[in-house]
């Protein structure tokens, strides 16, 4: 049957991607490992935002707050409390989810621009707390010197004792991100995913057909926040430091832009958007200091001509080819 | 097709390519590459740019005499945008992709420790140009590859305490930006002034955020506590707005100009930007000043020569004060390479410990004990003097930091 | 902790008022643009920054005519706003809000680099004019005359715009456009020209604010990002689209921030964000806002 094939194909492609990415530290120079590690975490983050923006129509301006909360949780537990990585990572997701629950409870009662404004307000509140609570979070200075977890067991298991912490950590990130993406995929292809889409299309009608829209919105808000928290935890270690910048509105804007650039109308769009923008950012900075201007132009063209992002472009291209 | 013609063409092309290859091999002495993460944009760019230029000046001087170890030096600058996570990203890119041999740079006390971790990860010597926070070289953060060419909050705070201890005041207030540098400098000052003058009372402490644009409420709150003197660490380009707003509220007048401004409040940039609005009679510090006339004749000669070169490079008779920091940082690195006779970071690290250089401000030593330079600062009182378009610090002196280093 | 004296409280209130009026001057343009054009202009902070830079530039060219520089700077900003409206902004009036916000953000990004390119990263300064260098002293309270001027001008502008909107024919047309622009165009009004005018006026106000603020604080890249969040908080608290709401929002912001520093110094940043959240939860359309009828 065609649909079965499609599903199987997709699963095969995803597995191939996973294995391919997993092979990178074995063959590629360390810089690619570091770059891809960064890209994986950010892709996971923007995809978690897309659960809200693309699938449910909830435009959150404060998503970075949960990323930041997760980062602080993980960083603090690992550096100051010396707890093991597994525990810290779970705590990161938990704090992200908890923050999302707190904010989401109020936010989902509002619509459209007010929802967005309140998510922004909450992210500012969380940011202000981290910024001022100097004794705990290090304030503006942040927490630096976050240690890598002990990953020698990985390099031993793979038979590559020469692996640096960075390379082993990449594999850990890959696995965690893969689990998160799998979870997101399961959600959006399940009946829940359909409900999310109906809420996006017409919330009033959804309530008429019996959907408890507020509960669903809150639930997905918490899920997105939890995944963002996990991404934050991963990033805290990758970055070897946590800073209040992580939760500032400019970071939320960055994530939103990445998702839109890739295409919020698709599952993988935001991941592609993140990767592309990270790449462009890096290459542009090597040539000129005027990255803001370049990004501005990209955004301008995006909003004027290609609101459905790179994915939309790709779809248009493949459609025209097929019709030929 | 005329095959002989084609063959001839092909041969010519080949010869041409070989020629280019030959010449490039002759000139391709692989340079020593130094990654330079620095703030080059935003509000902090006004310091990062002269620092980079000062570093480049030193590099050009060295390269003109044949480089070091027979190789030229090449700076690879990257903009950190004053964000620690961006600093981490560019530091990794510089090390892993640009394959730099060393890292020199960072400005804020957030960037410094962030890049220090990467330097440790990559095992490359990193010389911090500007971060003053003690946390950079604290016992729990120090490692063989991090060195500081900047002054630090301990010496800066204590030097200020030494000056303030001479004032006839009892009630003291502090105002500092709420981040590591502001907090550490204030803490070190307060601890030392309490030792020198136990009779002084700290009546108020204000902590505006860094890059605050509206200081009025903080100034008002502080004036309300009626201090007789104020210790400030308002820095990083903010001193300009602060001084204007404070001046407008009669802040300096009400404390009889018993004000001491750390964080380069007395830099050329600040003096020039404020011009006639600069509060005269206050104390301030700076790394360098073109008008400084040192007592030691040898240092005076070196400094004058340096200032002349600086003025040419900046096409300005009143060149900025930050350039010297970039210059000195590169000087430490190159002299370290020379002493180690190698670009291996482990050897350079050993060579740097205890290394003494003769900088345009005199002798500076990179202490082996905590890998910090004995970097003093110029401290002086703001005054109008003939021959200068804006106020300068006069009297001004270089306070020896070793008085305050444990 | 000793309680501050009455005059200290008074002084703090006045400084809060100064902050408030300054912000109101900038926010008034934003409110006007949103009220009529239904466009949440993220780039408003950029026009504010441009006003400051233009003021510096004119000051340098004209050597000391402060008031003329301010006026020219405001006009230049208004003209630039008109140009951008004509070429870019008007394409977005009917687009979804997300696209509008992203577009205006792209303008923010581009303007910030253009400013950096033209004027560099150096901090620039403008001197206060001689007649306003004096400071009034009321006991413990020090009120610089320049700050007083800003308070006065903001109030004059507030009342002026209000009268314009209520009393004049142009004002009524503008308010009608906010209500139902299709009807208005059917009545023969050139709505496009009207929109251009309103947008331009909003930018003029932002530029004016920037030019006036210049002698008080530093002119640096980054001015745009700093102020835009404060502006958003203000218009949300006061009510998106309500003019007096923006005024009220500015006062609240200024006072909370100012007194926050006095009483709860650790948390004044937190306090304003909290108020914004509370208002959105309790009365999302803002204190003086009306429920969006569109």
Image (cartoon, coloured by chain):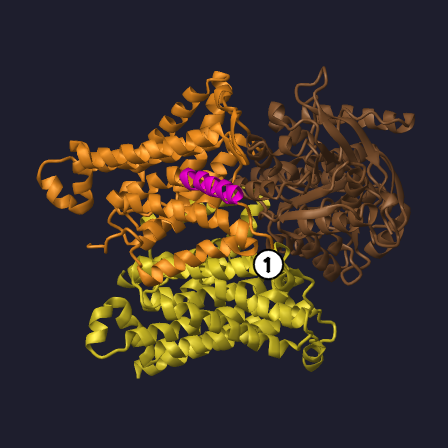
Task: Describe residue B406's horizontal placement relative to residue A113 as left or right.
Answer: right
- Circle 1 SS class: loop
Which tint is chain A? yellow
Tell me if residue C16 is in the magenta stretch: yes
How many marks can you see? Answer: 1
Disc 1 designates what residue?
Answer: A243
> With respect to residue A31, does B328 lie above or below?
above
> With respect to residue A208, does B163 lie above or below?
above
Question: Depth check: C142 or A115 in front?
Answer: C142
**Which residue is pictured at 78% across the width and 36% down the height?**
B167
Question: Depth check: B96 or C12 in front?
Answer: C12
Which tint is chain C? orange
Query: Which image quadrant is residue A106 in?
Result: bottom left
Which tint is chain B? brown
Question: Depth check: C272 or A125 in front?
Answer: C272
Task: Describe residue B75's horizontal placement relative to residue C258 as left or right.
Answer: right
Query: Which image quadrant is residue C88 in?
Result: top left
**Chain letter of the residue beneath label 1 in the structure image:** A
Determine if residue B330 is in view: no
**Which residue is pictured at 71% across the width and 69% down the height?**
A164
In the rendered structure, which segment of residues is drawn in magenta?
C6-22
In percent of width and height, residue A113 lies at 32, 57
In percent of width and height, residue A298 lies at 42, 48
Determine if residue B270 is in view: yes
């Amino acid at each position: 049957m065609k649909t079965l094939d499609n599903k199987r194909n997709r699963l095969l492609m995803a597995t191939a991607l996973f294995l391919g990415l997993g092979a990178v530290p074995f063959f590629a120079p360390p810089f690619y490992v570091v770059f891809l590690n960064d890209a994986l975490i950010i892709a996971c983050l923007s995809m978690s935002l897309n659960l809200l923006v693309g699938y449910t129509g909830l435009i959150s301006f404060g998503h970075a707050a949960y990323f930041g909360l997760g980062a602080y949780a993980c960083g603090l537990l690992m550096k100051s409390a010396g707890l093991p990585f597994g525990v810290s990572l779970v705590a990161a997701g938990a704090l992200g989810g908890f923050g999302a629950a707190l904010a989401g409870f109020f936010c989902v009662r509002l619509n459209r621009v007010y929802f967005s404004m309140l998510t922004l307000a909450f992210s500012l509140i969380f940011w202000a707390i981290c910024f001022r609570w100097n004794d705990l979070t290090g304030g503006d200075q942040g927490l630096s010197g976050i240690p890598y977890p002990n990953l020698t067991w990985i390099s031993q298991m793979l038979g590559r004792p020469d692996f640096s912490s960075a390379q082993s950590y990449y594999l850990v990130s890959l696995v965690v991100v893969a689990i998160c993406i799998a979870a997101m995929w399961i959600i959006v292809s399940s009946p829940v995913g359909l409900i999310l889409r109906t809420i996006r299309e017409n919330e009033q009608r959804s309530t008429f057909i019996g959907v408890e829209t507020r509960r669903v919105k809150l639930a997905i808000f918490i899920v997105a926040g939890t995944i963002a928290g996990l991404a934050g935890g991963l990033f805290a270690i990758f970055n070897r430091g946590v800073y209040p910048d992580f939760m500032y509105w400019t970071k939320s804007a960055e994530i939103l832009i990445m998702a839109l650039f890739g295409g919020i109308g698709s599952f993988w769009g935001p991941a592609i958007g993140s990767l592309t923008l990270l790449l462009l950012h890096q290459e542009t900075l090597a040539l000129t200091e005027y990255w803001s201007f370049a990004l501005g132009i990209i955004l301008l063209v995006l909003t004027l001509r290609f609101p459905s992002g790179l994915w939309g472009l790709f779809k248009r291209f493949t459609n025209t080819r097929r019709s030929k | 097709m005329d095959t002989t013609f084609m063959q001839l063409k092909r041969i010519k092309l080949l010869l041409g390519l070989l020629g280019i290859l030959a010449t490039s091999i002759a000139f391709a002495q692989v340079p020593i590459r130094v990654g330079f993460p620095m703030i080059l944009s935003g509000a902090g760019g006004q310091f990062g740019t002269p620092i980079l230029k000062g570093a480049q000046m030193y590099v050009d001087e060295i390269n003109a005499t044949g480089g070091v170890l027979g190789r030229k030096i090449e700076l690879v600058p990257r903009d950190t945008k004053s964000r620690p996570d961006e600093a981490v990203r560019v530091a990794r890119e510089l090390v892993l992709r640009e394959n730099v041999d060393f890292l020199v740079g960072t400005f804020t006390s957030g960037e410094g420790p962030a890049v220090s971790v990467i330097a440790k990860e990559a095992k490359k010597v990193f010389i911090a140009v500007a971060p003053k926070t003690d946390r950079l070289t604290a016992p729990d953060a120090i490692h063989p590859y991090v060195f500081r060419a900047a002054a630090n909050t301990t010496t800066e705070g204590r030097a200020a305490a030494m000056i303030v201890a001479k004032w006839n005041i009892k009630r003291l207030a502090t105002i500092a930006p709420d981040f590591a540098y502001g907090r550490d400098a204030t803490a070190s000052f307060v601890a030392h002034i309490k030792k020198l003058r136990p009779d002084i009372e700290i009546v108020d402490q204000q902590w505006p955020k860094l890059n605050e644009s509206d200081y009025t409420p903080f100034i008002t709150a502080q004036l309300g506590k009626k201090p007789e003197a104020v210790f400030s660490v308002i820095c990083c380009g903010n001193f300009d707005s602060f001084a204007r707003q404070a001046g407008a509220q009669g802040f300096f007048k009400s404390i009889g100009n018993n004000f001491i401004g750390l964080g380069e409040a007395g830099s050329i940039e600040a003096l020039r930007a404020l011009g006639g609005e600069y509060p005269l009679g206050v104390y301030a510090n700076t790394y360098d000043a073109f008008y400084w006339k040192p007592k030691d004749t040898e240092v005076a000669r070196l400094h004058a020569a340096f200032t002349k070169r600086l003025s040419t490079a900046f096409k300005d008779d009143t060149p900025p004060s930050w350039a010297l920091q970039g210059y000195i940082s590169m000087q430490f690195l190159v002299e370290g390479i020379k002493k180690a006779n190698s670009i291996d970071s482990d050897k350079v690290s050993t060579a740097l410990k205890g290394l003494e250089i003769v900088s345009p401000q005199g002798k500076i030593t990179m202490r082996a004990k905590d890998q910090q330079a004995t970097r003093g600062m110029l401290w002086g009182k703001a005054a109008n003097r003939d021959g200068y378009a804006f106020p300068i610090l006069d009297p001004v002196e270089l306070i020896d930091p070793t008085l305050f280093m444990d | 902790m000793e309680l501050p004296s009455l005059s200290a409280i008074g002084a703090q209130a006045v400084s809060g008022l100064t902050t408030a009026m300054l912000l109101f001057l900038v926010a008034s343009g934003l409110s006007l643009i949103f009220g009529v054009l239904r466009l949440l202009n993220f780039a408003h902070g950029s026009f504010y920054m441009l006003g400051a830079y233009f003021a510096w530039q004119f000051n340098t060219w004209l050597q000391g005519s402060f008031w003329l520089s301010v006026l020219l700077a405001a006009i230049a900003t208004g003209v630039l706003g008109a140009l951008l409206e004509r070429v870019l902004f008007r394409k977005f009036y009917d687009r979804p809000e997300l696209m509008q916000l992203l577009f205006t953000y792209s303008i923010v990004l581009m303007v910030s680099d253009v400013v950096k390119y033209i004027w560099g990263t150096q901090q620039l300064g403008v001197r206060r004019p001689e007649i306003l260098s004096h400071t009034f002293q009321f006991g413990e309270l020090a009120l610089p005359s320049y700050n007083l001027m800003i308070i006065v001008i903001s109030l004059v502008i507030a009342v002026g715009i209000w009268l314009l909107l209520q009393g004049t024919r142009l004002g009524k047309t503008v308010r009608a456009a906010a209500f139902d622009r299709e009807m208005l165009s059917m009545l023969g009004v050139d709505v496009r020209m009207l929109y251009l005018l309103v947008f331009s006026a909003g930018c003029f106000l932002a530029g004016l604010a920037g030019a006036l603020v210049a002698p008080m604080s530093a002119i640096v890249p980054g001015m745009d990002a700093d102020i835009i969040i404060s502006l958003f908080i203000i218009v949300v608290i006061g009510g998106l689209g309500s003019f007096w709401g923006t005024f009220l929002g500015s006062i609240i912001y200024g006072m909370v921030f100012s007194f926050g520093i006095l009483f709860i110094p650790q948390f004044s940043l937190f306090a304003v964000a909290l108020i914004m959240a509370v208002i959105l939860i309790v009365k999302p359309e803002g204190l003086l806002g009306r429920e969006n009828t569109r």
